[in-house]
Image: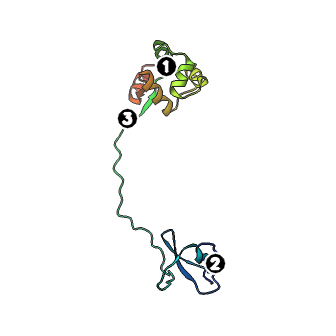
Amino acid sequence: MKAACEVCGGPIRTAPNRVEIDGAVMVVCNGCSKLGRSVSGPILRETHAVRPIQQANYRPAPKVAEPEYEIDPDYNVMIRQAREKMGLSQEDLGRILNEKPSVIRMVESKKLKPDPVLTRKLTHHLKVTLLIPLSELEGGKTGI
């Protein structure tokens, strides 16, 4: 297998040249040797295989049982009341949250359940608690 120039990729037909181009020492053909300054020393072909990095015995930290949360079933009413209390229109709230007004309308009409990111934005800006622990949600439903 013929050696290939590390710059142009073409086969090296004559003796390879070792040059430094932008701080990198490369083995190049005669045509590409003009792109850098000549470096003296023997040209060694790398024949060793690249070994993967050995990983230590990695053990992930044990997961702490976090309480699972669900959005309050009356989220639409809570959002609308908080928005109105702040004197904001749906368009204003959409602009503040960087969301389309149609998204705010759909959330308030309960046609769209807010995703975690939107829930966090609404909770932060409207200062309402939209997430409740599942244990409370399940506890409240058992009496039905």
Mark seen at residue 79: 1
Please give the name of the residue rendered at 47% of the width and 28% of the height, measured from the top-left corner: 121
Q: Which residue is mark 2?
A: 31
Q: Secondary structure at mark 1?
A: helix
Label 2 Cα neighbours within 10 Å, binned few <14 / some 14-19 / many ≥20: few
Q: Count neighbours of disc 3 (C-alpha within 10 A) and say few if under 14, some if 14 to 19, many if 20 or more.
A: few
Residue under the image location 36 percent in, 46 percent down: 63
For discs 2 and 3, the disc positioned in front in the rendered view: 2
Question: Residue 33 sits in which quadrant?
Answer: bottom right
The mark closer to the camera, 1 or 3, is 1
How far apart, in angstroms, are the residues tagged by discs 1 and 3? 23 Å
Give left or right: position of 11 versus 94: right
Display colour scheme: rainbow
Question: Residue 84 in the image: x percent, y percent?
Answer: 49, 13
Q: Earlier in the sequence, mark 1 or mark 3?
A: 3
Query: In terms of secondary structure, where does tag 3 sit?
Result: loop
